Image: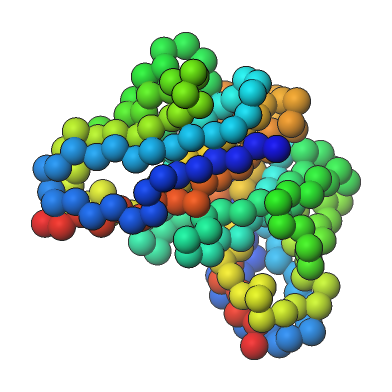
Amino acid sequence: DVKVTQSSRYLVKRTGEKVFLECVQDMDHENMFWYRQDPGLGLRLIYFSYDVKMKEKGDIPEGYSVSREKKERFSLILESASTNQTSMYLCASSSLKLMNTEAFFGQGTRLTVV
Amino acid sequence: AQSVSQHNHHVILSEAASLELGCNYSYGGTVNLFWYVQYPGQHLQLLLKYFSGDPLVKGIKGFEAEFIKSKFSFNLRKPSVQWSDTAEYFCAVNAGYNQGGKLIFGQGTELSVKP
């Protein structure tokens, strides 16, 4: 089974802190994604990466950055956390070579910024 | 840019009622289409997917969806819902290789099924 693992289920951080959310997948997938999920807004794409060291902005990249130094790991960074970044963050991965496969999701990290 | 629109934000049905959830997307090229489900407290799971071929696709738990290219739609249906179908449902579009596999989701539809 594909496994996408997010390092934390719950996080509480203070305004202004630098926050790292880590995601690891074990299926050698090329694509990795970071979304945030908010009630009534669905899943909004923050960043995605289709290869090591490659990244593309999604729909809401402001206030976030990402890092992909290894194929299996995709990190989301909040340079200076703000209360409006309180949300559920979801990581996903998918195969780029096998286009008839879906994305697989982690359990999510619920981040609260106080 | 791609976008996905789900028409219904919250749907309330009684058990055994029929379900149809609307999904429209905007992208002129070849697309792959998905419906995901999120049960309370659980992670997103794939319900069904369309890549090519028969536009009527069947998924798990009796769900099906129809791809109508001329309408840019991929509506989800189930003839008879159960209480256990209570969940949030998300439609998603992948614009394919040219977009690097970028996957865009709709706003989600919360389904509540009353016993």
Q: Quadrant of the C terminus of chain B?
A: bottom left
Instruction: Give the x, y percent position of residue A1.
Output: 51, 40
**Who is closer to the viewer here, A2 or B20?**
B20
Q: Is residue A8 above or below residue B93?
A: below
**Which residue corresponds to the image point at 66% horizontal and 76% vertical from the top-left?**
A84
Camera sees residue A88 = yes
Residue A101 in the figure: left or right of residue A39: right
Camera sees residue B45 = no
Quarter location, residue A14:
bottom right
Q: Quadrant of the N terminus of chain B?
A: top right
Instruction: Give the x, y percent position of residue B36.
Output: 44, 43
Quarter location, residue B25:
top right
**Which residue corresponds to the image point at 71% horizontal and 62% vertical from the top-left?**
A22
Q: Is residue B70 above or below residue A84?
A: above
Total number of numbered discs in the rendering: 0
Residue B36 in the figure: left or right of residue A80: left
**Which residue corresponds to the image point at 39% horizontal and 54% vertical from the top-left?**
B9
Instruction: Give the x, y percent position of residue B52.
Output: 51, 15
- Judged from this view, the residue extending furthest toward the top is B53
